[in-house]
Amino acid sequence: MSIGIIGAGISGLTLAYELEKKGIDYQIWEAADRAGGYIGSRWETGPDGQRYLRELGPNSLLGDSDLLLWLDELGLTPDLVFSNPVSKARYIFRDGQYRKLPSGPPSLLFGGFFSWSTKLAIFRERNNKTVSPDGETLAQFFRRRFSREIVDYALAPFVAGIYAGDPEELLVSETFPILLQYEKEYGSVVRGLIKNQSGGGRRQSFSFRNGMQALTNKLAASLTHLSLGDPVQRISRTSHGWQVESKSGIQTVDKLVLATGTDAAARLVATQYPAFASALNQVDYPPMTAIHSVYKRADVAHPLDGFGGLNPTIEGRFASGHIWSSSVFAGRCPDDEVLITTMVGGRAHTQSARLPDDVLYDKVHHELVSSFGIKADKPVFQTLARWERAI
């Protein structure tokens, strides 16, 4: 049996790697001249020769012991970098400043982030007997079981960070089905979380010494049938499988896997499956621009003691949020500097992501200055990466 794979992002690469281990014949095609897809890491040199590690796409992995064993099999254990303990803290912009989100029952109960009415709603959720109807969105689910405040100041910013999306549009069944399972099995999300908080193994956040691209580079290097810079022009059904026509020629495979974005997939299946292609073309990918800014540590008043700060849409901020990259992982910039990755765009701020470079740099700098007590007139170093079709 032979298997064709179109697309050498993390999904296509992982499938090809597992097939190679099992000795199954495969061929993987990638239009770009490098593997990795959205995963990209770059070492950049600053004006005075300083070195900065920028993540252009995903910033980290969240995995358990099984994933760590798989990475060890790949030979990546020596390159692992685990997140600093301080990064467990999450900040949300509210009432003019970044405030730490409650991390457990004591800070939830005695902290001032949420109102007493929301705290009461969380306590009462265990006795909420309502059941999710078909087609319920995330926002509707959390308002029904908790409160509007939870939606505005916890759910919405985190959904923007994960999906660059709007909780008023995303279905709970497609984004967090575990919540529906808890509701069904335990009659309560809170009770389900308590029952399962130690299940499935402890997950950790980590990356690699030279960034996330170390993973895709290692996978790509282990493949014997990877064709880069080889865009697939068309596919067609045969009596025994699929014929794939690419820049390098024509090849026939028994089974075919599309590991591409939905736009490329729609183009390839349009002739064979027009209705499927039409559905694929309706999948929304909001744009996102990642701006990387470096400042002297002495010029930043905020301790940056967390993963970063998210901006709820209701607060009307320019950026979706800021990752304190040098706080999360060591070695991303010199010790006397800080590296901040700012995300601009998403479903709620589509046009902001497409602003000219100089406008984005200026707006981000001023938001960082006002948010974190930065006294520098400009960053030591600043650059960006654009994703027109992001998440």
Image (cartoon, rainbow, N blue to C red):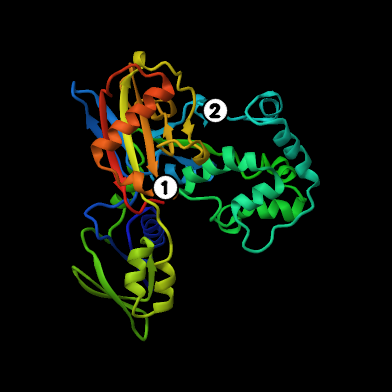
Vertical order, 124 against 1 (above or below): above
Position in image of residue 91 (x %, y %):
52, 29
Front residue of this view, candidates 93 and 308: 93
**Mark 1 vs mark 2: which is more N-terminal?**
2
Front residue of this view, candidates 372 and 218: 372
Residue 102 numbered mark, or none:
none
Tell me the crowding category of disc 1: few under 14, some 14 to 19, or many 20 or more residues within 10 angstroms, Cα based: many
Q: Quadrant of the N terminus?
A: bottom left
Q: What amino acid is found at the position of numbered circle 2 in the picture?
A: Asp
- Residue drawn 18% across the image and 21% down it: 48
Q: How many marks?
A: 2
Position in image of residue 250 (x %, y %):
22, 75
Front residue of this view, candidates 109 and 46: 109
Residue 346 numbered mark, or none:
1
Q: Is residue 79 visible?
A: no
Q: CA distance from mark 1 to mark 2?
A: 22 Å
Q: What amino acid is found at the position of numbered circle 1 in the picture?
A: Gly
In this view, the residue farthest toward the bottom is 239
Vertical order, 245 against 41 (above or below): below
Residue 95 numbered mark, or none:
2
Position in image of residue 385 (x %, y %):
29, 42
Position in image of residue 253 (x %, y %):
33, 75
- Residue drawn 78% across the image and 48% down it: 128
Q: Is residue 357 visible?
A: yes
Secondary structure, mark 2, is loop
Q: Are marks 1 and 2 in contact (CB under 8 Å)?
A: no
